[in-house]
Each structure stands twice: as structure tokens, then as C-alpha cells.
Amino acid sequence: MNAASAQRGLLSKASVLRIAPSHGWWELPFSELWDYRELLYFIVWRDIKIRYKQTAIGAAWAVLQPFLTMLVFSLFFGKLAHVPSEGMPYPIFYYSALLPWMYFAAALQNATNAIVENQRVITKVYFPRVALPLAAVLASLVDFGISFLMFLILMVYYGIHPTAAAVWFPAFLLLAVLTALGVGLWLSALNAIYRDVRYVMPFLIQFWMFASPVAYPSSLVPEKWRWLYGLNPMAGVIEGFRWSLAGHGTTPGRMVFVSAAAVVVILLGGFAYFQHMETTVADVV
Amino acid sequence: MSGAVIHAEGLGKRYRVGERERYLALRDILTRIATAPFRRGARNGRRDYLWALRDVSFDIHQGEVVGLIGRNGSGKTTLLKLLSRITRPTKGFAEIRGRVGSLLEVGTGFHPELSGRENIYLSGAVLGMRKSEINARFDEIVAFSEVERFLDTPLKHFSTGMQMRLAFAVAAHLEPEILLVDEVLAVGDIEFQKKCLGKMQEVSNSGRTIVFVSHQMNQIRRLCERVIWINSGEIQESGAAGEVIAAYEAASLRPASAGERHNANFLHWSVCGGNNVMRDGLREITLHFHLQLSKSISQGHFGVTVTDSDNVIMIGWGFDNLDLPAGANELVLKVPILPLRPGNYNVICALFDGGNNLTGGELLDQWHAVPPLVVDAKPLSHSQDRWAGVLNIPAKLQIVQPIAAGIASPVTNRT
């Protein structure tokens, strides 16, 4: 007997939808999400539209933020503190890391608030709630796209040619999205239940950035500890970006695999916890 | 299951109330953990529970229009939320055949920063329409909402009325097999409500199943054949609309008085000694009220009020200094003329002992007369509803043309 999940009664008259108390944590919502893919599209579209309607600087911010940070890092960490940059010009070294990092930070911030901001809709209509943090993570890709264009300009300026490693870039981008989704699921669920989580966010992001190879290369970490360092999924993502985009930096090894494995665990755990929250959130939110 | 479109069995929903705060904060959790060693004895994990719904079972078949009535807080909205999958039941289960559309509020999914057009798509998608469906019905939706000129302005610049019209226009063009509606028709002006009601009737005529929650009995009567009355989370009664509504009204409108003081009871009433239908408002009519008194009253006051379906008082009368004996009484109201527009009206009568409620008399019984007054007369005022008003009196029109020198002109009479 199917434990409490909706069958595809949405679309066909013949099948029956069963509404019953929830039984476990373990239901991956993929087929339901597929049924609701158009709604997911509309939510992403809405999030993007609103982001740009409400800001004065708008698209420029997507470029300014990583660019200015890159300048500051290049000056202080690079020129003055002489942090090793593995053969890349400092701006490239920092920007290639800031690219996925800024995406991650923004996606996380938006995902955390996703459930709470939409509480009105959640209490009035049904759709798989996981669409909300998912939409937040996808909508943030637009900003990523814009800052990526800036990166391409930098590459041209510094005369960096993409190497064969560039073929792996989409894989690392996917890894970045999955990381943001995995952590985002946890945080949005936590925030729906414990409302002060979003105040912890800025500190968490800050701390996490220093724990990730943004301002320094992961080669600073001694070889034998690097796998442990890889438990931070963003370590693998960032080094992957550096390697596939700029062609330099550490060739992905054990560390990246550990990161990828960590992402899978976080993601599955995130879905499970989110499901758990979902059964109570409409009553509590 | 026998072909039921909605089959509910033993549905129950329990909420936690009391000690637990609505929102938790991590810091509270952490504090609690940190101070745990210092707390003496186990903290009592007792929580108070509230059963919003308890053991609710019913079957609804294809094409039925079912009204759901009950006092505020009785569990009607919780039931709709369960059927809409917004929240999960604690016990029991339900099985639904067909696509469900839930209208639990007006303007679900709307965002003030987006334009009217964008909100139509967003709201339609949230309510469950596919993009192709929204595209196909876009023009109808805009026409129904009457906001063509403002389609591309942000919603925050719309008046509340316009927002509601737009919201309902989107919702009205949702075409699910099962429609769950929660009191959304209670908002808005008369025009809007009429439009919404009309659309709902269209939906029901097309064979769809509707579950409709409302506090307005006239709307329920108009749309629903069957009514389920929910009281404190349980089904009190379920059956034909007229009967269940009568029982509900009887239960909720009696003054909450204990047995001894309850010594008056209106039993039934009629128009001209017949039924509840008035066919001609321009002739004298009589309204007969039958009541039973356990004790005689003196200096009593009898009041009758006639209101329309929106509870606007059409007319009322009050009679003082009444002396009535114990036992069965019949009060006959003679009205020389009662020119009301065709429609349903509520008749409310009240009996006071020793003065009316303004002069300190005690209310013995107040009754929203059942069945309602049905005026089935020929409409005599303006042919368009919005100009017709509430009175039904004929008028004759005479056209007088100016007299030119020496020529007598005809006088045209018109009715």
C-alpha cells in the first residue's frame, strides 16, 4: 500500500488520489515535481522578475558584487599577503572562485526564506513545497549567468584560453547547483520551523566562505588532510571551477570525489528532512 | 466506494495548542538544552491537543453540489484543507477521483509587483492550470474581470475591488472536475457576488462536483442540493439542503436561554394562510405567525422585519402593548401593500415580554422564519437589475409635447 503520497490523479480522471496521514520520511518527490513542472517554471519566472523589478541597480549588482570582492581580495590577499595563486593572475584566481561562491551564497539566502516568504500561498493551495527552494536555487542562476559574462571578459583581458578541461565545466556547475539545493533544502526546512535561522545565515555564509578555497587555494591544505577538507562540498565545486575554467589549479582528485559524495548525502538528507517539515509546516507556518 | 468522486472515511485532524509557542527559535532550543542539567525533574511534555475534525465520513458523487455549513471554527475550512492536500489528516483517509481545484481565498498566488497580465499567469499556474489552458482562456478571464485597461499595470495599483474581480476571474476559469470553494463569495460588492454566484451555477450546470462553504444560507440554498452541517469537528447532519439549513438555523438562532425561560416558540408562518409565496405585492396581504406560549404575556412587543438576501432591512414593524394568553396563538399581520422585487427575503419575527428590547423587555423568542418569503411577482420596475432597486411599483409615463400656437398636439400615454 502506497504510504500517503499523491498519485498522478492530477491529470487523469481514472486514477485515484489518496489522502492519508504521512508515514515515513522517505519519499522522493520527483514524479510529482515533474507533474508540476509548469508551476515550477512560473515560480522561477516570478522570482527572477521580482528580483529585477525591485532593485535600482538590478543586473549591475550581479556583476559588481563578485567584481569588487575580487578587487579587494586581489589587493589584500594577493598582492599584499602573497597568497599562492597556482600560476593564475590574481583576478582570475579569485573571480573563478567567487563565481560559484556568490551563486551559492545567493541561492542559499533565497532558499532559506523560500518557505516562509510564501507562507500565504502554502496555506491556501497545494503543490509540492520542494518547488520553492528549488525555484530559488534555479532563479539565482540568472545572476550567475551575468557574472559569468564578466568572467569571460576577464579571461579575454588576461589572455587565458580555455583548455580541454573546460569540457568538465557543466559538470561542476551542476555540482554547484546540487550543493546549493541540498543545503538549501535543509535551511529552508529549518527556517520554516525555527524562525531565527535566517539571522544565522550571514554568519554561516561568512564562516563557510573562509572554510572554502575562495581566498586561498586548497593546495594550502596538507595532502593527507585534503580529503577531510573535501567534506565541504564547496571545496570540490570551487576547485573544479578554477580547474575547468582557468585551466590551472589542482587537478581534481580525491578531494572532489569526497565533495561530490558529500553533496549526494546532503541532498538526500535534505529531501528527507524537508519532507518531514512539510507534513507539519502548513499547520505551523 | 461505488463511484463516489470524494470518499472520506474517519477523517480526523488534530492540532497542538497551548504551551508550545507558535514559532520556535533555535536559541530557545539551545537554551533549553544548555539548562537541561539544571532543571529538576523531567519537564512535563504534556501538550494540549485540539481535534479540529473528528471521524468525518461521507461520500460525494459526480456532479453533486454540496454545501458545507457550520459556525466559525467548526472545522469546515480544515476539511477543505485536508481535501486540498494542504495539510495531512491525523487519522482516517480520503480518496478523490479527478482533478481538484481549491479556492480557499481570493487572489492566491498574486504578487503586488507584477502586472495584471503576469498575475493571471502566476495565479492560474498556482491554482493548477497549465500554461496552454491559461493562454486559451486568457481573453475570457480578462473580459470577466473587466480590467482590460490595467492589464499591464502592477497589481499594487489596482483597487481592492479590481484585485478581487481579477482573482475571481482567474479562479472561475479553472476547470477542475472537483471544485472546493471556501467562503470566497462572502467578499466583494453585490455586483461581484452576483457574478460569482452566476459563474458557480454555470460550473455546476456543466456537471462538475462542487463543495461550497458559506455562511450565507441564501447562497447555499441557491446552489446546493445537499448540505453537510459540521459542528465542533463532527458531522451534525447531512441531507437535503432545505432540511439541514432549517435545522442549522433553528439551532443557531434561538436565544441561548435555559428551559424555564424559554416559554415562547414560533412554530410556523404563511402568506395569506397559504404557503410562503407572495404573487402580487400591490394587493393587501396577510402574514400569519403561529406561536406557542407557555405563559401569558402582558405589555408584550411583537416585531417583524423583512430583509433581503444581503440582510438589508426592507421594512419592519413593531407592535406594543400586546396581551397574549398562554397556549397557541396566531398573529396576523395585515399589510395593504408590500411591493418588493421578485426574489427571496428573510422574515424575522421577535416577541418580547414587557416592552421591546429598547425599553427593557425580555426577548422570549426570535425566529428567522423558515421557509423564507418568496416574492414571485411580475417585475414592474426597470428591466435592468442595477437600476431596478428594491421596490416593485409600476409607473406610467406620459409624454407631453409643447403646444405650438394654435395647434393642439396629441398627448401620448405610455406605461
Image (cartoon, coloured by chain):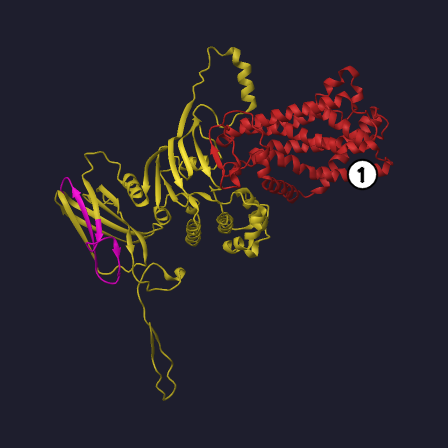
| Colour of the chain lettered B | yellow
Compare residues A242 and A192 and report the one nearer the observer. A242
Vertical position of residue B276 compared to residue A187: above or below: below
* In this picture, residue B298 sits left or right of residue A59: left
Residue A205 location, quadrant: top right
Can the viewer see residue B383 in this picture? Answer: yes
* In this picture, residue B284 sits left or right of residue A190: left
Most distant residue in the bottom direction? B406
| Residue B31 image point, x, y percent | 55, 18
| Residue B153 image point, x, y percent | 59, 52
Task: Give the extent of the magenta segment.
Answer: B269-296
Secondary structure category for the residue under label 1: helix
Question: Which chain is drawn using red?
Answer: A
- The residue wearing badge 1 is A152
Q: Residue at x 54, y 25 (%)?
A: A25
Residue A132 location, quadrant: top right
Can the viewer see residue A222 in this picture? Answer: no
| Residue A208 image point, x, y percent | 69, 24
| Residue A193 image point, x, y percent | 54, 27
Vertical position of residue B392 compared to residue A229: above or below: below
Q: Residue at x 72, y 37 (%)?
A: A144
Crowdedness near tag 1: few (<14), some (14–19) or many (≥20) residues, C-alpha within 10 Å: few
Please, what is the three-letter code of the amino acid marked with disc 1? Leu
Residue A80 location, quadrant: top right
Q: Is residue B289 magenta?
A: yes
Q: Is residue B157 magenta?
A: no
Compare residues A78 and A9 and report the one nearer the observer. A9
Q: Chain of mark 1?
A: A
- Count of marks, rendered view: 1
